[in-house]
Image: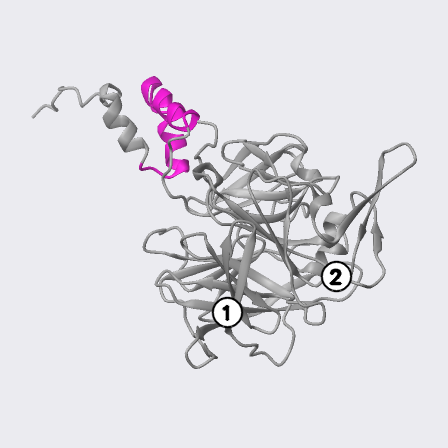
Amino acid sequence: MEESTAAGPDWSMLPSDVLTTVLGELEFPDLFRAADVCTSWRATARALRRLGIYSRPQTPCLLYTTAGGGPGAAELLSLADKKAYRARLPDPPIRERNIVGSSHGWLVTADARSELHLLNPATGEQVALPSVATIEQVTPVFDPAGGLERYDLSLHGEETQPYAVDELRGVLYLKAVLSCDPSLGDCTVVLIHNPYRELSLARVGDEEWHWIASTPLEPPRYSDCIFGDDGRVLFAMNLLGGIHRYTIEGSRATPETILKDISPFVAYNAYIAKTSSGDVLQIWRIKKSTGGKQAEIHTTVVNIYKADFDSQQIVHVPTLGDDALFIGHNCTCCLSTKDYPGLLPNHVYFTDDDEYWLMDGHEICRDVGVFNLEDESANEVVSPQLWLNWPVPVWIVPNFNKINK
């Protein structure tokens, strides 16, 4: 019996609308591979990205820099296929920035003048945020010629502390989160910043930051915050586990305590998140530092609790079930592994965000890994670790939507 010589289907002849629909459902690693099939597929894949209409939800990636990539490039290690993809980014060079946030596919970075920018590594778009000089506690100081000499940081009634122009960013900014994808419009950015881990907010396009005032004798000292699904409510957790809910209206935010302080000790590495089913979690991360000249810090314990607002208590959660949790400078989040099969259920993906450890220098080895909640072990994301220690690696969910379509 002879094999049939009938030709197979010519997939390059798919109608453009059908091909656009099919390719639009692929995660970006598969989309990139599909672009290599033939000329028509490549043209459609490029058009999806160029027009900013490729909106398929993506599996998180680890963003980092490498020596071989140059100062203006970053690598995106996809957890979907465990491969790295290089992104060329606009100036200032990513290696010269501090990364202080990652939400909805956008980084929040601070440049050498301590100014903040939104940056989308997937599209290369960049948006300037209001000047650091408009933050309530910051005062620019100029030399006789009118040049910016330094910044003074006010400690609310105490003496101000002077910082060099490029030094302030490392002290001032702790974390930034976004209310939504900026390409959708009406996006609010909230900063946790010093002194005293306070909050300021601004809408993308605003001219200044708006301080959410607190009682001087009782500074809030927030460790983390997340937005509600509608982007109008902010949940902020302080260092003692108390949770405050802020209703945001314009440049104002009205607070309400929804969980009292419940911790007997201050926890600098604590986070707040929502599970895929809607429960509010507190995550308490414990680290251990090694001694010697090449000191390192490692995550050794991750404890997770569910907030019970009715009883004003927290209840230990032994397992995340099918969820995977991401902590670090990224917006803290849980994702269902049923929706993202490349992720490990009941695992915590972490990056280094220790306030004082980051101040100690750019060459310190970073605490990046995956924590198994079942056996309480920490493992590397990938081996060998190829990233540079600065800027600090961060989790990001690639977003190919464009502001300027």
Q: Which mark is residue 295?
A: 2
Of residue 178 and residue 61, the one placed in the foreground of this image is 178
Q: Nearer the viewer, mark 2 or mark 1?
A: 1
| Residue 45 lies in the magenta stretch | yes
Q: Amino acid at mark 2?
A: Ala
Residue placed at 67% from the left, 63% from the top?
297
Q: Which part of the image, by quadrant, shows the C terminus?
A: top left
Say which quarter of the image contains residue 37.
top left
- Residue 282, disc: 1
Q: Count up the numbered dots.
A: 2
Residue sitting at x 33%, y 20%: 38
Q: Nearest the camera: 160 or 327?
A: 160
Q: Main secondary structure of the magenta part?
A: helix
Which residue is at the front of the view, 96 or 117?
117
Residue 396, x across and y down, in percent: 51, 46
Is residue 312 among the parts visible in the rendering?
yes
Marks 2/1: CA–CA distance = 29 Å
* Residue 72 image-quadrant placement: top right
- Asked if disc 2 and disc 1 are in contact, CB closer than 8 Å, the reply is no
Query: What x and y, as percent, mark residue 390?
Result: 68, 46
Give the secondary structure at mark 1: strand
Give the residue furthest to the left.
1
x and y percentages locating residue 350 in the rendered image? 55, 58
What range is drawn magenta here? Answer: 25-51
Name the amino acid, label 1. Gln
Left or right: where does residue 223 sit relative to residue 44? Answer: right
